[in-house]
């Protein structure tokens, strides 16, 4: 057999095969590096675009309202000028805009968390009955104990959201195979419908409760009580911290429970922390603005277009993108009616219903 000069005792064909294998490995590494670079650029551009959109929506939220103010008046009011313009901007529009950012971020991250730990692309606080649970608890608190202040409402909303979340997850976990996305969705719809009917019955039988919840139940950020931020921000911050703490383990859970355990993830702990996080976020948003639907459903799907399936980036993108949807819907609600305003929850429902139908008809929803 003829041997090569460079490697005595090694067949020429073997040397050629080794070189080919090395070339293939180098090409694969180069392709992987290029793919990571493209993904990083897409994430950066996506976050930059949504950040700019959020800044524009905040500016429009400060400039647009039932009382017409010129751009010069708004800028002067923000700079500390007093008068009627200063009162309108600082007492009404700034708190409303801040509330829109908080509510949007909490709902967006809650939706992303729920879709991740249930492995259900159609999960969101509205569809899984979490909003209905919070609304029922708030109505029950107002009817039975006369609780109408935000400091009391937030606790009822938290308990209602937690009970609804745990009930839906347990019902969806019954049967062979453990938690199933379809069973969880059906359980959420059933629990939400039941609690929504009971809430409607309470508000119809008790006129005082009906008056208290009439505007709140539509989902609105127009009214900002003085104690709102002190009652909502701690829940929102704690929920966001817990959400980002479990973002990396959720990536492993997306591969399946068995593989997640093999990779060293604590599946039960991750799910429990995820449930607590989603409940805190939903309770904060619902207590402050009422049950606003579809934000947690739409935003994570849109964010995955530029972040990919990494939950850490999905949560970050949802926290920035969801306030854009809430503020834009609120701005549209201020403009469509000449005699008043349309609550933000109604506007998001108009946008979200077609999106839900489109997602349900797709053969394969965006990857989790």
Image (tube, grey):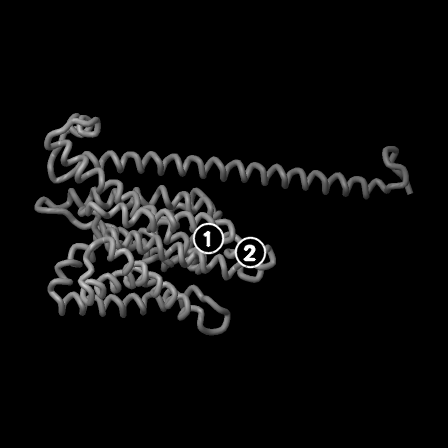
Residue 213 in view here? yes
Q: Please identify the quarter of the rendering in which residue 22 is found.
A: top right
Q: Position of residue 221 (x, y in %)?
A: 21, 47
Q: Residue furthest left?
A: 339
Q: Residues within 10 Å of mark 1 (few under 14, many from 20)?
A: few
Q: Please identify the quarter of the rendering in which residue 173 is found.
A: bottom left
Q: Position of residue 282 (x, y in %)?
A: 32, 55
Residue that appears at 12% across and 62% down: 208
Mark 1 or mark 2: which is in front? Answer: 2
Residue 277, relative to residue 80: is it above or below?
A: below
Q: Nearer the viewer, residue 92 or 328?
A: 92
Q: Is residue 216 left or right of residue 156?
A: left
Q: Position of residue 34 (x, y in %)?
A: 56, 36
Q: Nearer the viewer, residue 154 or 365?
A: 154
Q: Nearer the viewer, residue 226 or 278?
A: 226
Residue that appears at 26% across and 68% down: 195
Q: Earlier in the sequence, mark 1 or mark 2?
A: 2
Q: Residues within 10 Å of mark 2 (few under 14, many from 20)?
A: some
Which mark identifies residue 367? 1
**Circles 1 and 2 in contact, beta carbons < 8 Å:** no
Q: Is residue 107 left or right of residue 7?
A: left
Which mark identifies residue 265? 2
Residue that appears at 11% across and 37% down: 67
Q: Position of residue 213 (x, y in %)?
A: 17, 59
């Amino acid at each position: 057999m003829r041997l090569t000069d460079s490697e005595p005792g090694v067949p020429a064909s073997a040397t050629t095969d080794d070189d080919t294998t090395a070339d293939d490995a180098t090409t694969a590494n180069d392709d992987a590096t290029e793919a990571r670079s493209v993904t990083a650029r897409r994430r950066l551009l996506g976050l930059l675009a949504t950040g700019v959109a959020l800044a524009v929506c905040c500016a429009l939220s400060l400039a647009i309202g039932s009382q017409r103010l010129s751009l010069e008046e708004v800028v002067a009011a923000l700079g500390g000028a007093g008068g009627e313009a200063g009162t309108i901007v600082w007492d009404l529009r700034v708190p409303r805009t801040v509330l829109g950012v908080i509510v949007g971020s909490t709902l967006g991250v809650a939706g992303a968390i729920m879709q991740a730990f249930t492995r259900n692309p159609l999960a969101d606080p509205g569809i899984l009955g979490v909003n209905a649970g919070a609304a029922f608890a708030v109505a029950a608190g107002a009817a039975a104990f006369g609780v109408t202040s935000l400091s009391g409402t937030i606790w009822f909303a938290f308990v209602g959201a937690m009970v609804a979340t745990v009930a839906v997850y347990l019902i969806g976990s019954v049967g062979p195979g453990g938690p199933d996305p379809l069973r969880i969705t059906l359980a959420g719809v059933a629990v939400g419908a039941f609690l929504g009917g009971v809430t409607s019955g309470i508000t119809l039988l008790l006129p005082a409760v009906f008056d208290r919840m009439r505007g709140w139940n539509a989902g609105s950020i127009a009214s900002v009580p003085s104690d709102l931020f002190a009652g909502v921000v701690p829940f929102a911050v704690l929920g966001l911290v817990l959400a980002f703490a479990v973002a990396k383990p959720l990536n492993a859970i997306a591969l399946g429970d068995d593989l997640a355990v093999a990779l060293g993830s604590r599946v039960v702990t991750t799910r429990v922390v995820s449930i607590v996080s989603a409940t805190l976020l939903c309770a904060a948003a619902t207590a402050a603005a009422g049950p606003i639907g579809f934000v947690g459903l739409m935003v994570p799907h849109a964010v995955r277009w530029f972040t990919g399936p990494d939950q850490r980036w999905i949560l970050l993108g949802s926290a920035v993108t969801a306030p854009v949807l809430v503020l834009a819907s609120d701005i549209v609600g201020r403009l469509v009616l000449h005699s008043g305003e349309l609550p933000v929850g109604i506007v998001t429902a108009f946008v979200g219903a077609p999106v839900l139908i489109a997602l349900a008809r797709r053969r394969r929803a965006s990857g989790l």
